[in-house]
Image (cartoon, rainbow, N blue to C red):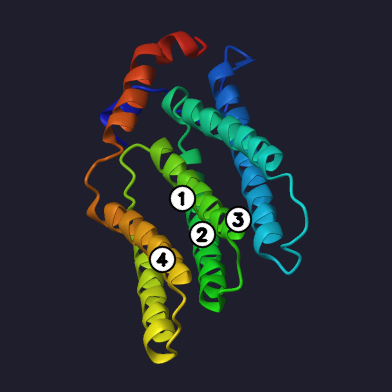
Amino acid sequence: MNDQQSKSPSQTQPRRRNGQVSQRGMLSVVMLFVSVGTLGISMIGGAKLAYDILGPDKDKELSLFAAVIALGVAYLVGWVTAMVAIRVYGNLILPILINWIMWGCMVGICFLYLEIMDRLYAQKYDLWHYWEYILVMAAGLTVLVGLHLINEGHNLRPFSYPLLIISVIQLALIVYRYVFEGSDNNLYLLGDIFFLAGMSAFSMLMLAHVGLLDPIRNRVTTYFDMNSTSIRTQD
């Protein structure tokens, strides 16, 4: 744990003081369940939305805007609750669970990438579905980055490895499709290159760990350093 976290109360379980249950410990436990529950709901809902877009019945009508708003609210509640539980009430279990959730999210992103790559290779999509692929992938990556910001000092490098491997596979498929099979559809080629460039750039930034997210992390840390005492209960 870093210095900032050591300033927060370390208890995760509620403790009795003079016959009374510690409100800090109780709130820490409650926030743990609320954050894990709401984040889990958003992840399951996101997986269902991705299946509706990419699944066998992908042509059915979807209220995409309403679905994104609902999932965004669930994720935001879980994100804020986890941030308060860790940085204000010093929950020690939640950072471990957040890391597990991140790896689960990473598995989903890789599966999503492979599914989208298969559809790009088959060239059986229109412009609207192409933008849906981009938005779904961008949403998944945004969720991953948001979870990364919760844990202080978290390293994103290990999460870049599977994305880089899949990017290399996609590049090989592009070369095979347009060199060995001789496809001459320039619009599909542009779509393939744009998607590959975006995923490769994101993966390389994760691997380089150049600190692009440091201003956001520092702002969040500064806010909780200044306000954690007033937010936290006194017993």
**Residue 98 to residue 80: above or below:** below
Which mark sits nearer the N-terminus, 2 or 3? Answer: 2
Which mark sits nearer the N-terminus, 3 or 1? Answer: 3
Question: Which percent across, then down, holds residue 55?
Answer: 70, 66
Q: Are marks 3 and 1 in contact (CB under 8 Å)?
A: no
Judged by depth in the image, the label closer to the viewer, 2 or 4, is 4
Q: Residue at x 37, y 18 (%)?
A: 223
Badge 2 marks a residue whose secondary structure is helix
Judged by depth in the image, the label closer to the viewer, 3 or 1, is 3
**Residue 74 to residue 135: above or below:** above
Which residue, given by chain and number where applicable, does mark 2 sit on?
109
- Mark 4 residue type: Leu
**C-alpha span from label 3 to label 1:** 20 Å
Which residue, given by chain and number where applicable, does mark 3 sit on?
128
**C-alpha span from label 2 to label 4:** 22 Å
Which residue, given by chain and number where applicable, does mark 1 sit on?
141
Give 38 or 200, whichever is nearer the viewer: 200
On the question of residue 21 being in view, the answer is yes
Badge 1 marks a residue whose secondary structure is helix
Give 168 or 106, whichever is nearer the viewer: 168
Question: Which percent across, then down, holds residue 172?
Answer: 37, 80
Badge 3 marks a residue whose secondary structure is helix
Q: Are marks 4 and 1 in contact (CB under 8 Å)?
A: no
Q: Are marks 4 and 3 in contact (CB under 8 Å)?
A: no
Give 13 or 220, whichever is nearer the viewer: 220
Which mark sits nearer the N-terminus, 4 or 1? Answer: 1
